[in-house]
Each structure stands twice: as C-alpha cells, then as structure tokens.
Image (cartoon, rainbow, N blue to C red):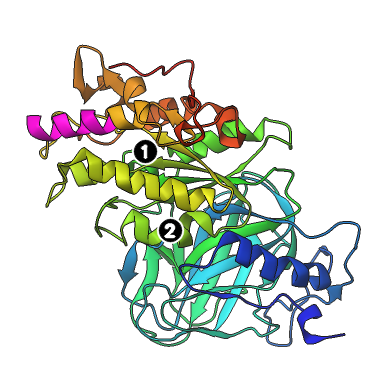
Amino acid sequence: MPATARVLAALLLLPGTTAATATAATVTTATAAMTAATTATAATTATGAPAPLAPLRPDPARPAVWTGTWEAAPSGTAAALPGASIRNVVRTSVGGTALRVRLSNRLGRSPLRLGAVTVALRRAGGPGAVPGSLRAAVFRGARTVMVPPGRDVVSDPVRLNVPAAADLLVTVYTPGDSGPATYHRTALRTGYLAPGGDRTADAEGTAYTATTTHWYYVTGVDVLGAPAAGSVVAFGDSLTDGTGSTFDAGRRWPDRLAERLRVLPPSRRLAVLNAGVSGNRLLRDGVGPAALTRLDADALSPAGVRALVVWEGINDVKGAPEASDPAAFATAYRAIVTRAHAHGIRVVGATLTPYGGHGAYTAAREAVRRKVNDLIRHGGLFDAVADFDAVVRDPARPERILPAYDSGDHLHLDDAGLRAVADAVVLGTLLGCGQGGQGGQQPCRSRETQPRS
C-alpha cells in the first residue's frame, strides 16, 4: 500500500490555503486511512498513553466528506506554557463518525513542538473525559510534531463518534518553550492546565489543577460524515466573539444560529464556525490581522464552507484612527464577496449595530455608521442582508441599543440581544433563497428585519 494511503497526511497550511485545496488534499487520503472503530476502552501503550488504533479499509461507495464543526480564529499570542498540558474545551455544532483537529503556530515566531495531543468527549463539567472516549491524535502516524512558524497542522483522522452540541476536550502538551503561543483570547469557556508534564492521557482530569480562559493552539475541529450540507462561517469582531454574553454558557449569536440550523433536515443543515476576533477591524490590523488579511485562513479554508456571514466594521468606525469614508467599506466588502464567490461561497452582510452612549461615540461617527449601513442594505454588495441594526436599535433613540439588549457598555449585546440577531438570519439565505446585488436581483432579507432608513 503506498504511503499516501496509510494515514491522512498532516497538512501544513499557509494562511492562504483554500478550502478546495485543503479538502482535495485530504479527502483522498482520509478514505484510504481511517483509525479503527470505537471500542469500549481505548488501547493504551506501556506508558499509559492512548494508542492510535489500526487503520480501517475504506468503503469506496462512501467517500470521505469532512465538515468543519468548530473554529476559533487566532487572535494573538500569549506566553508559552512549557512543560504543561493544556486541556481546551470546545463545542461541536454538528456530529460525525470521526474527527481531526487543527493546531496552529500561525502567529508564532519559532518552531512549535507538540509533544502529545489527545481528544475526548467531556464529562458533564470539569476536565474529565467520558470513559472510553480518550484518543491519541497523531500526525503522519507520529505522536509528536514540529509546526513551523506561520503554519497550521492537521491531525490524522481519529475514529470517535462525536455527537452534535457536545463538548470535546482537545489536550495539548508542549514539552519546551517554543516562544509566543498562538491562542484565542476570548474563549468564554473554562479550560484546564496541568503543570506537571504530559498529562494528555489523564481521563479523570485530576492532574488539571489550574484553569484558563483562553484556547491555546487549537483553531479548528472537523468531523467526518456529518448529517449536514456543509458549514457557515460567522466572520466578525467582539460582537461575534461573544463579548457581553454569559461566561461558560455558550450564548454567542453563532451558538444560537447553530441551534436553529440543527433542527433542519440534513440537506439544509449547516455547521457553524465562529471566526469572531475581539477588537478586529475590517480595513486595518487591530487585534489579530485585518479582516481582509485573515479571510482565507479563517473563513474560506475550513472544510465544507458554503456560506459566510460578515458582521465587521464597527471598530473601524469608532477606532483610532477612525475610518470615515463609506466607500472604503464598500470596497472591502466587495473584495470579501469576490474572494468568497471564487470558492462558491455565498455571503450575507450584516448591518452595523448602534453604540450610542459608549465612550467612543460621536455624532460624526454615527453618520458614517448609518451611511455604511445604507450601502449594506441597498448597495447590492452581498448575496443577502441580515439587518442586525434594525433588530437591536432603540426606535426612540436609533443611535442606541435597546436597553433590553444592552450588555451595559452600550456597544456589546447581552444574551437576549445576541439571540435576537441570530434569529434575524433567514436560514434560507445561507444556501441560496435569492441572489444578491452582484447577480442583479434583490438579496433575501429577514421578514422580521426589513431595512428601515
């Protein structure tokens, strides 16, 4: 059997790698090399670490189709945690019969050595794993892997039945100091740290005596054979990242969107990937690379992307230096749509929500926000429009968020507000209930959120 058929090669992905390239490079090898079927208890080595299971022969009648089920876009770097095991907790949006994980050194400056990686289903609460679910994630069959700076690595497939809306434990051991760690700052989930060496195989979780509020290294999880038509990426800033929502509760607006999509039949169901980065900007670097810089890596490359919801630009309106030319926003939005269309991905544009009462608010900036929203609604930029502004603004004071939706800082939404914007997305627009302005027809819009001037 040739080497490419033994296991899925771990892809070292440049930020510009496309979804089509990644999928084509992995699907063939995935069908030829799957880890063995789930057993009641994972096999272990003499050292106690979970062993990778023997490969299965593929079924030619059922080609492998990978779908992204979870994502966290890199937002920056943090100090490395040499000698520690980091147990990240992530939640799936759709399930599957196997998984693979993406780990990143995209923002690092030195080669990253991963000493061991495991995945498991999480027991209810805490760092413990569901008995029998702990699996080793390997890379071209090896437990350790070196990731060059500026790149990601994808594991070989791991056979594990993964439910939808399930918490996964993705545990990473870094034996040495590889320099600044690529991470996602605003996890809004409790993660766990074991400072005493390689504890990736600790199913009970007793070694995890410290906690973190960040996701380290892990940037994506794909599942095989998901009962779904693909995935939708929520692309934005802190409003998408979930600032203002309840910690450890999974109440970001993409979480609510995933709930809505899960009740649809598989032919219309989509996984939801959250590519929000707090502090991110559309037109220039802010926290993390600018939207146009990170678009390919965070929105166009994940497996199975069919649609993209773009809610980005308020930090350009209110930030320093501020962006005051609505035409620059339109140019950037057009560039996003053009690049997405080249991958066969539909784009829904979301209007910018109000922030009156926030410290950065001025009347001049409010005028820019309204002009940008007019372009989003009526400029024919997108395939469809989700009018988030119309849903959450106070009719009596349209420069402000409704008090019932205000998290308290007059910029970010609370749980109710995030639920309201998620419910404003017309699900049919994600797979094509109409063509956008670039196609010459009116974009689909929510019945609840018809644009208002």
Q: Within 10 Å of the Cα at label 2, are there few (<14), some (14-19), or many (20+) other Cα atoms?
A: many
Above or below for 389 versus 174: above
Q: Amino acid at mark 2?
A: Ala
* Highlighted magenta segment, given as a residue range: 362-373
| Disc ID at residue 245 | 1
Neighbour tally class for label 1: few under 14, some 14-19, many 20 plus, Cα within 10 Å: many
Q: Nearer the viewer, mark 1 or mark 2?
A: 2
Question: Looking at the magenta stretch, what is its main secondary structure?
Answer: helix
Residue that numbered label 2 is attached to: 73
Q: Quadrant of the C terminus?
A: top left
The residue that appears at 13% across and 47% down in the rendered structure is 322
Give yes or no for residue 372 being in the magenta stretch.
yes
- The answer to if 401 sits in the magenta stretch is no
Pick whichever, 37 or 11, lies toward us: 11
Residue 306 appears at what percent x and percent y?
60, 45
Q: Residue at x 79, y 75 (%)?
A: 53
Q: Position of residue 369 (x, y in %)?
A: 21, 33
Residue 38 in view here: yes
Please tell me whether residue 355 is drawn above or below residue 344 in the rendered image.
above
> Which x, y percent locates residue 21?
61, 66
Amino acid on which the number 1 mark rests in the picture: Ser
- Ranked by sequence position, the earlier of labels 1 and 2 is 2
Q: Quadrant of residue 258?
A: top right
Q: Is 5 left, or right, of 332 in this rendering?
A: right
